[in-house]
Amino acid sequence: MAYAVREGDPTSTGGFVISASGTQLIEERRLARMGDPVWCPACEKVGYIAQGNPTFIDEYVAVATHGHEVQCDCDRGTHTLIASQQSHAADMDAAIEIPPDMATEAKLRAEKMTQARKAG
């Protein structure tokens, strides 16, 4: 099932969704969408949500669902999202890639967050 991912949800590398830009809430937590930042302890960097579900949209941006990929310094496809709730799901299990312009913005934001973390 394509359960929606939220702020704070875990990932396959032991990371988590740092913050979510969605306007919708599920159980008091914002929905995560394409481009939102994700911490990855495996590569020790902030990455971003690289996929979204085209059947679940929040403010014109696809919401991330269980199994969607995170883009970080790990090998592609090895870092995925894990939904922590099972009450809200997309209409179907589907994925679209983050648009290039949105990916560029997300990458810059993730790099700044990684630098800030290293600086203390």
Image: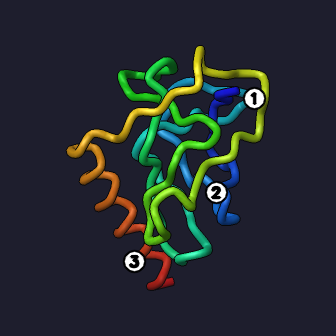
Residue at the extreme top of the image, as rendered: 91
Identify the residue position indicated by label 1 in the image.
27
Direction from residue 98 to residue 92 in the image, left or right: right
User: In the image, is residue 48 above or below residue 119?
Assistant: above
Q: Are marks 2 and 3 in contact (CB under 8 Å)?
A: no
Residue at the extreme left of the image, as rendered: 101
Q: Nearer the viewer, mark 2 or mark 1?
A: 2
Residue appearing at x 47%, y 48% in the figure: 49
Q: Amino acid at mark 2?
A: Phe
Residue appearing at x 40%, y 33% in the figure: 96
Q: Quick one: quadrant of the N terminus?
A: top right
Residue 88: give its label.
none
Residue 16: give its label.
2
Q: CA distance from mark 3 to mark 1?
A: 32 Å
- Give SS at disc 3: helix
- Give SS at disc 2: strand
Rate crowding at label 3 as few (under 14), some (14 to 19) or many (20 or more) other CA atoms within 10 Å. Answer: few
Q: Amino acid at mark 3?
A: Gln
Q: Nearer the viewer, mark 2 or mark 3?
A: 2
User: In the image, is residue 22 above or below residue 89?
Assistant: below
User: Which of 60/28 is in front?
Assistant: 60
Residue 104 in picture, x, y percent from top left: 24, 53
Q: Amino acid at mark 1?
A: Glu
Direction from residue 2 to residue 43 in the image, left or right: left
Residue 62 in picture, x, y percent from top left: 43, 28
Residue appearing at x 67%, y 58% in the figure: 12
Residue 115: give its label.
3
Q: Earlier in the sequence, mark 2 or mark 3?
A: 2
Q: CA distance from mark 2 to mark 1?
A: 17 Å
